[in-house]
Image: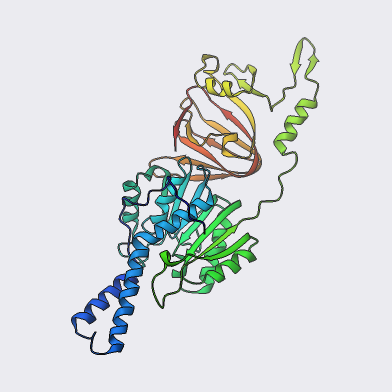
Amino acid sequence: MRSKRSAAIRLRRRGEYAICIATVALLVVAVALLQAGLFGASAAAALVFLLLLSILSFSIHTTRRGKFLVWREILDELSLRGDERVLDVGCGRGAVLTMLAERVPHGRVVGVDMWTADQSGNGLEGAERNLVAEGVRQRCEIVTGDMRSMPFPSASFDVVVSSLAIHNVPNREGRDRAIREIARVLRPGGRVALVDLAFTASYARELKSLGLTQVERQRLGWRFWWGPAVPSTQLVLAVAQTSKPAPSPSLAQQFMETSEEANMVGHLPGRETLALDLAGHCIYLAQDGALRPYARTAEFFRRSGESAELADGHVIALFDVRTPRDVHYPVWEMHPKGDELLLLLSGCLTVEYLDAAGTPTAVLRPRSAIVVPAGIWHRLIVNEASALIAITPRHGTLHKEI
């Protein structure tokens, strides 16, 4: 793996991260044996002592420094844009979770764990404290759940990572289920980075059988080594296949092209009608029932939240959604003047809400609609290319950073 210097992730962490419980147990055994005078009685005993000492030394280095160095390089290789939705499977006290959060200032990082005792002090409270200590709490969410049956919609994450967690599942069937769950929640084109002490060949085979591509295993070297007689830590990388090609043109584009090909000006008795190009226009629906077209420009969307012209109604717009920026910039949005109606024509989107209970989500599928209540912060997550109609009370619309 190439080594890079990264300004995005600090090597010195502010949180308190756990030591593997096996390391703690080994230290206790070594001290007890030393106090009992069992070392030094023979050359064999001396060798055992040296072996324990070397394992302890490597384990402490890996836990306190080495894994952070290696994960920094792994995240460098992922080349995150900064607006992704990322999942950390078996997040523990958040060592990797917090590093990820620093890389996605406009995204969202979710950690899932069952909080088993594989680390000293492992628990939800410790993870929450570390998120606060590292200054990333606002863009992170921690969920208690089983990696073999994760409580997330399919195709809801751009990147899935795991560090020294999957091997804790006690049997192969369970570990295969965890890998299948990782593949299930990964979006088309999404990436996987799994680090573990054992079973990595099995992970790679299962990922290949599920159709993921660019599957490879790498040894992570001495910085992520736990000492003599301990398996070397390995990295498994993979990429989810892109979904079936989006309709060409997409459904939204078909609507737009139909409007362009129609006669732009027609006639009804006593009035003039206009077939609008929905790629270039929005429609304002006033409370008195009047409809007014507006040119669809960045300037229109910037000023529509403040315009007195648009104070009492809703804006109707068709979006051809490929990335979050096509419909929502990577920020939270809120409409204080009324409810917003989102109608999905094709594709798949997730609506994420921000409230006191966390960040609940709702999946929007073709021919379904969601009402976003007035005063609720929300954003859209793009699961696949979509055609969306939004009917929005834009006056007074607010935004804030994720």
Q: Quadrant of the C terminus?
A: top left
Indicate whether 75 appears above or below 374: below
In the current view of this chain or complex, which residue is farthest to the top?
Answer: 270
x then y, percent, for residue 240: 62, 56
Image color mode: rainbow
x then y, percent, for residue 347: 65, 44
x then y, percent, for residue 84: 52, 45
Indicate whether 386 appears above or below 304: below
Residue 10 versus residue 138: which sits nearer the camera?
A: 10
Can residue 190 be seen here? The reply is yes
Residue 239 versus residue 269: which sits nearer the camera?
A: 239
Residue 332 versus residue 392: which sits nearer the camera?
A: 332
Q: Quadrant of residue 278?
A: top right
Indicate whether 237 appears above or below 263: below
x then y, percent, for residue 7: 42, 45
Indicate whether 42 appears above or below 112: below
Can residue 169 be seen here? The reply is no
Q: Report how many numbered discs are placed on residues in the image.
A: 0
**Residue 76 located left or right of residue 119:** right
Q: Quadrant of residue 179?
A: bottom right
Give me the residue at 43% from left, 60% from top.
90
**Residue 338 located left or right of residue 130:** right
